[in-house]
Image (cartoon, rainbow, N blue to C red):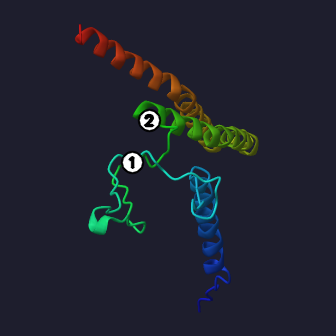
Amino acid sequence: MKIYKKKKYSSLSKFAKYGFLFIFSFYMLMSFVKVNACDPATDPSCKPDTTATNNLKPDTTAGGGSNTNGININTGITNPLGNSFTDIPSFIKAILKFVLIIGVPIVTLAIIYSGFLFVTAQGNSEKLGVAKKTLLYTLIGAALLLGSLVITDSIQGTITEIKSTSSQ
């Protein structure tokens, strides 16, 4: 006769785990979003967007009077990231800086964890092998993480050098 243990809180723990991941990722995404909720009609300090080049003007030809209820449609394409990222290399650098901010504490915790594995191995060769692999992979990941900006700068420098020599 088998006795099955019922997991009492398995769905609750999954909900908490995935809920935390959703809230954390939503918070991180919202830190990059700039919300501008001002209305030029009610707030005099708010200025309307006048950067669009293709706006419909009110019809002033009908009956000699001016139509003040005209439609203003903005058909210009705006940068969804704002004016801070105007080209792809600056966007990639910003992403890499964000990854570094998140990745460096994770690497630190992984090194601490591999040290914990070394301590708990207590001379067992199999556990020491696992601890060594964990430390090796952590150091490789740290080298890639910390060298990512250097790698992108070198690739960008090479591409700009190729562009400058090919245009001459």
State the image quarter where residue 113 is shown.
Answer: top right
- Disc 2 residue type? Thr
* Residue position for label 1: 52
Residue at 38% across, 67% down? 67
Q: Which callout, 1 or 2, points to the residue nearer the camera?
A: 1
Front in this rendered view, residue 123 or 100: 100
Does 51 sit left or right of 103 as displayed? Answer: left
State the image quarter where residue 104 is shown.
Answer: top right
- Point out residue 119 in the picture as x, y percentages from the top left corner: 76, 41
- Point out residue 64 in the picture as x, y percentages from the top left corner: 31, 64
Residue at 29% across, 14% down? 162
State the image quarter where residue 17 is shown.
Answer: bottom right
Residue at 63% across, 78% down? 10
Query: Is label 1 in a helix, a strand or a loop?
Result: loop
In the current view of this chain or complex, which residue is farthest to the bottom? Answer: 1
- Disc 1 residue type? Ala
Disc on res. 86: 2
Front in this rendered view, residue 105 or 63: 63
Q: How many marks?
A: 2
Name the image quarter holding the N terminus.
Answer: bottom right
Does 32 sit left or right of 154 as displayed? Answer: right
